[in-house]
Amino acid sequence: MGSIIACICCYCCLTTLKPRCIEIIALICNIIEICFMIWGIAGIPWDDIKIGGKILFFIPFAFMVLTLLILLILMCFRCGNKINTSKNSAAKCLCITMIVFDFLSEILIVIAEIIIINNMRDKDDNYYGYYSNRYRNTQYSDGEWAAAIVSVTVTEIALAIHCYCANFLLKLISAKTNLSYLEYLDSKEPEHIVTRTVNVFNSPQNEDNHLNFLGYDQNGHPIYSGNAQYFTQNQIDPNKTKN
């Protein structure tokens, strides 16, 4: 649920931000991911966790380190003004790789969290069996439970935001623009040009063939009275011309 809320908030925010700002947000998320994963590595009681939970936890951690390196490369491309020119294709490939790593990390870390919590809960149940219900203690400290639950949950939220940032970066890199996404969409809309048609009439051959301006019709077209020989067919509505 936290990841869904984070994505909704990101969409409202990221559309108005330029690529450099999005990269900084992604960098902050990347650092948060790694820091909280290190907390999990240090605080989770790994001796009681099955091998599957360990593998599924450490693979996303490796992916997060790789996405950090990829993001730093993209930021270097942008600082060198090459991300929209000579390095554009490479930047798109790196960005797609980063999105794939984020997506896989999100799935694996969720599964790892379920395995870790279940393993800890099973161990706690066995430990409780040696005590009466009144005096039973917990197998794990609050810090260990926090490392297993809080650290992973925060990491999942940061991953969702990071993945959303990577998606927006891919759109802007593909468009070869340094504008925000909304500014880019506005720049692609056709300009609304207001034109005014000026009708030029031949001078009348004599003073009797003069033109009198009567006003405008409901479509804003001028209405004249006079000799119709000075109007072309597409310039005048016969129903509004009086000879």
Image (cartoon, helix red, strand yellow):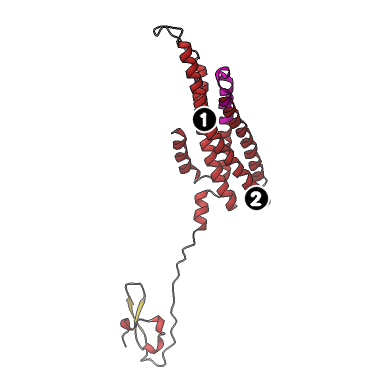
Q: Residue 119: give its label.
A: none
Helix, strand or loop at disc 1?
helix
Residue shown at 49% from the left, 59% from the top: 189
Q: Tell me residue 94's x, y (percent).
A: 63, 43
Magenta stretch encompasses residue 33:
yes
For discs 1 and 2, the disc positioned in front in the rendered view: 1
User: Callout 1 environment at 10 Å: few (<14), some (14 to 19), or many (20+)?
Assistant: some
Q: Is residue 221 left or right of residue 183?
A: left
Q: Earlier in the sequence, mark 1 or mark 2?
A: 2
Q: Quadrant of the C terminus?
A: bottom left
Q: Which of the two residues, 74 or 210, is positioned nearer the viewer here? A: 74
Q: Determine which residue is flagged by label 1.
A: 111
User: Callout 2 environment at 10 Å: few (<14), some (14 to 19), or many (20+)?
Assistant: some
Residue shown at 57% from the left, 53% from the top: 175
For the stretch drawn in magenta, what is the main secondary structure? helix
Q: Which of the two residues, 40 or 227, is positioned nearer the viewer here? A: 40
Q: Determine which residue is flagged by label 2.
A: 89
Magenta stretch encompasses residue 15:
no
Q: Tell me residue 48's x, y (percent).
A: 55, 18
In this orientation, does residue 81 appear? Answer: no
Q: Which of the two residues, 87 or 151, is positioned nearer the viewer here? A: 151
Say which amino acid is labelled 1: Ile
Residue shown at 56% from the left, 30% from the top: 33
Q: Which of the two residues, 49 or 93, is positioned nearer the viewer here? A: 49
Q: Quadrant of the N terminus?
A: top left
Q: How many marks?
A: 2
Say which amino acid is labelled 2: Ser
Q: CA distance from mark 1 to mark 2?
A: 34 Å
Provide the residue span drawn in magenta. 32-52
